[in-house]
Amino acid sequence: MKEKTISLRDIEGIGPATEAKLKEAGYLTIEALAFASAKEISDATGLSYDKALEITEKARNFLGIGFMTADEYYKKRQNVGYITTGSKAFDNILGGGIETQAITELIGEFGTGKTQLCHQLAVNVQLPKDKGGLEANAVYIDTEGTFRPERIIQIANNMKLDPNETLKRIYYTRAYNSDHQILIVEELMEKMPKFGARLVIVDSIVSHFRSEYPGRENLVVRQQRLNKHIHDLHRIANLYNAAIVVTNQIVASPDIFFGNPNKPVGGHIIAHGCTYRLMLRKGKENQRIIKIFDSPIHPESETVFRIFEGGIGDVEE
């Protein structure tokens, strides 16, 4: 006997006309409604705020979203997946690799290996679970024109994978400005199941916002838009049990006279919005040092990995 397919009409108060409006606005699942705000739904569909609020509340009740005991949440956390970085030492300090249902931020100066890691992860997510992958595809949002399919081919060849098949499982798009970048992520909420993706990469997340909203007079608007963007990425992470990886730059603070003057771009919005924050810096030759400096679970620690023609690996290999 076939299982009944759950649809938006299973929510009390959603009739054919309301369902059509919701689907046209991109709300295709009950989960999408549950994680959205009433204002977002109202603005996107033309429904009244009160009606949208009623829909979101009923969607959350339908899914059982609300208070739970810590042991229930612990059981839910058992569904979290991990993507290997390619380096055992790197994976070890992360507790298994890059985590799903979370945003991991890679921070560093130019040439520290942020984009190299992104290319490696776009391949590794395709691996079987017993090899450190999620048996899924990747989405790569390129804001600076640094994605290179040739690099994917090198990594795939090193891992004895079919390069053409590997490329076909990475959905690439170029974001040309901050509006376009925000729109891509909004549309991605609907496209994730079609893509079969469990990894979303944004390389880099702040670049467009930083160049388009310069100066203190534009700071409030920039941070508001960046905040919504981060929340949309979190929604994708939770809706689809996906890993979100974003890269970020660092900037020197002229008012710091002692200690390290370099700090990540994006301020408190990025700092509070990202689950795990990793700082990269150059070591000797092709080595890179990765440091966990903000995490809800990991101690502050660092290790070394290397970048070579075949991708990311351990130093001792």
Image (spheres, rainbow, N blue to C red):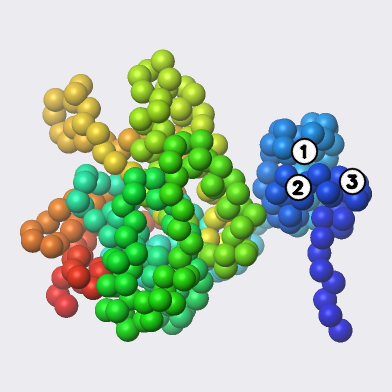
- SS class of the residue under badge 2? helix
In the depicted view, which residue is nearer to us: 239 or 118?
118
The residue depicted at 49 percent of the width and 24 percent of the height is 221
Say whether residue 274 is left or right of residue 49: left
Residue 115 falls in which quadrant of the image? Answer: bottom left
* Residue at the far top in the pictured view: 217
In space, the residues marked 1 and 2 are separated at their CA atoms by 8 Å
Amino acid at circle 1: Thr
Of 117 and 78, which appears nearest the observer?
117
Quadrant holding the C terminus: bottom left
Left/right placement of residue 253 relative to residue 80 reads left
| Quadrant (top left/top right/bottom left/bottom right) for the N terminus | bottom right
Q: Tag 3, which secondary structure?
A: helix
Mark 1 sits on what residue? 45
Q: Where is residue 7 in the image (x, y as percent from the top left)?
A: 82, 60
Q: Which of marks 1 and 3 is nearer the N terminus?
A: 3
Give me the residue at 42% from left, 70% from top: 167
Q: Mark 3 points at which residue?
A: 17
State the residue position of label 2: 24
x and y, in percent, of residue 137 in the image: 50, 68
| Amino acid type shown at disc 3 | Ala
Q: How far apart are marks 3 and 2 (CA)?
A: 11 Å
Q: Is residue 289 visible?
A: yes
